Amino acid sequence: MPTRTRTTSGPRRRPAGGTPGHRPRKRFGQHFLSPEWARKVVEAVAPQPGDVLLEIGPGTGALTRPLAETGVPMLAVEIDRDLVAQLSREMPPHVTLVSGDILRLDVVTYLSGLAPQRPPAPDAASPRPRYRVVGNLPYNISTTILMRLIDIDRRQRFFADATVMVQREVADRLLARPGSKAYGALTVSAAARTRMTRLLDLPPGAFVPRPKVHSAVIRLEFGLPTVRIANDDVFDRLIRVLFSARRKTLANALRRFDPSAPAVLARTGLDPRRRPGTLQVTEIVRLAELFSSGERTPVL
């Protein structure tokens, strides 16, 4: 069961560089952001009255502290209980720390209980909550976390955006163009449901300990779908089949999905000799729509 910790005392000053005595744990993919780069990320997030923040993996608090100083209510989810215990002694009351796994925690329930910061004028109405995500994602599960955020928003239309740090190669995959090696199932799934922007590139020296890879900060904006997906389940299964056979022709790849693929292809006008990796997101959405309209169960 996740442990919820709501602090009751004001923040304390502490030396730069994180939590003294804490050894980064490899199993949690811990690489802690330096204060200089944390400031740049906070500037990119730019919290506003009405925001409610979900921070994934606060770690030693490099982002948590400056974000807390803005006064916006926050839910910070950290799997390392030792770090939660240390952070709980210095976070202000509007920061709620939860020890738990972001992949299993019902964050919507937690966030829905946090009231947004009231505007300066005492007689002004409370702002409408804008739920936003920020975090230095563990690189070993960053893709899984992103897909969970996308799935939560797809089902509940909850988040406004997510500003997160990921491995540079993951950012390249998210923003890849059709025909490139990086273009794949992650690209298509995210591009169909969010608008993505690359905000910052970070060197290994921005973290302690230094990772062996470069990093990037990206923003995913929810609530602005670029296409209309008729059936999410069919769309997601189609993506998996297409990109597991990306070297095959489109005709051959689609036969693994549904025996009626030749007839569906004929209706789209797509060249059956094309490779799956050359398809635009809109073309894949159209294929999924036609397979869905036939009310057939895809064969996997």
Image (tube, rainbow, N blue to C red):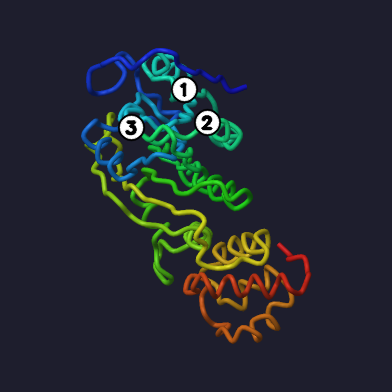
Q: Would you name the residue on which mark 1 appears?
A: 80
| Of the pair 270 and 224, the residue shown nearer to us | 224
Residue kind at label 2, given as amino acid type: Leu
Q: Are marks 2 and 3 in contact (CB under 8 Å)?
A: no
Q: Residues within 10 Å of mark 1 (few under 14, many from 20)?
A: some
Whether tag 1 and tag 3 are in contact, CB under 8 A, the answer is: no
Cα distance in 3D space between marks 1 and 3: 25 Å
> Picture coordinates of residue 57 (x, y %)?
43, 31
Q: Is residue 49 above or below residue 81?
A: below
| Residue at (35, 26) in percent of width and height | 61
Q: Position of residue 51 (x, y in %)?
A: 43, 40
The circle on residue 265 is none
Task: Report which residue position mark 3 lands on.
Answer: 70
SS type, badge 2: loop
- Residue denoted by label 2: 114
User: Is residue 55 visible in this depiction of the protein?
Assistant: no
